[in-house]
Image: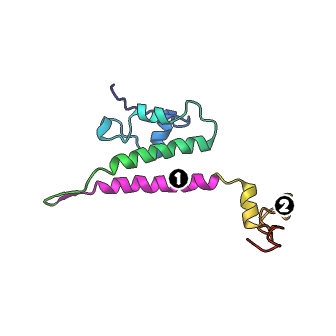
Amino acid sequence: MKKSYTYNPSNVGVYGIDRMRFELGDVMVEGRELTSALCDEEYGAVIPEKVHTKRQWKKAKLACLESIFRRFSYESDTKTGPLSLALGERAKLWQEEYEKLKVELKKSAVSAEAVALLTGNGIKESTMPPYFYNGMMSTEESGGRDI
């Protein structure tokens, strides 16, 4: 199967391969696999056909970032005379972006109500009884002693 590498800047406003390439900075497609992190088919396999939420888009972006940093992590640093290539640095940059987005997605997975309950802001009284309470491990059989 022949891999394709395309980028059309006029399509950046639409959730798709061009936008993903733009957001990741993977826009130098002229050199094909020598200058691009992923091919169009790899992006297409990860990006949903219809993106309905920002969270879906970020999850696809996270998968792309993971693929890129894992791919580049196999490249080693090289030094020949005065020339040195720190190819491992590329993988570190991609991994840092991956880790930031992963944390962002985890934070967005928690509902606003849960955050308010945890921080004590926003909700003065909960309508639900507390899950933990004094004596919850006590039983009548044990004479009221904690187990």
Q: Nearer the viewer, residue 125 or 69?
A: 125
Q: Residue furthest front?
A: 141
Magenta residue check for 3? no
Q: Which residue is mark 2?
A: 129
Q: Nearer the viewer, residue 146 or 61?
A: 146
Q: Amino acid at mark 1?
A: Leu
Q: Residue at x 82, y 73 (%)?
A: 144
Q: Residues within 10 Å of mark 1 (few under 14, many from 20)?
A: some
Task: Please report whichever mark, 1 or 2, sits nearer to the chain's N-terminal start.
Answer: 1
Judge whether residue 124 can be spotted in this image: yes
Q: Position of residue 28 (x, y in %)?
A: 36, 40
Location of the N terminus (image quadrant): top left
Q: Residues within 10 Å of mark 2 (few under 14, many from 20)?
A: few
**Secondary structure of the residue carrying numbered label 1:** helix
**Secondary structure of the residue carrying numbered label 2:** loop
Q: Residue at x 79, y 67 (%)?
A: 136
Q: Which residues are magenta?
A: 83-108
Q: Residue at x 45, y 40 (%)?
A: 21
Q: Residue furthest top?
A: 1
Q: Which residue is mark 1?
A: 101
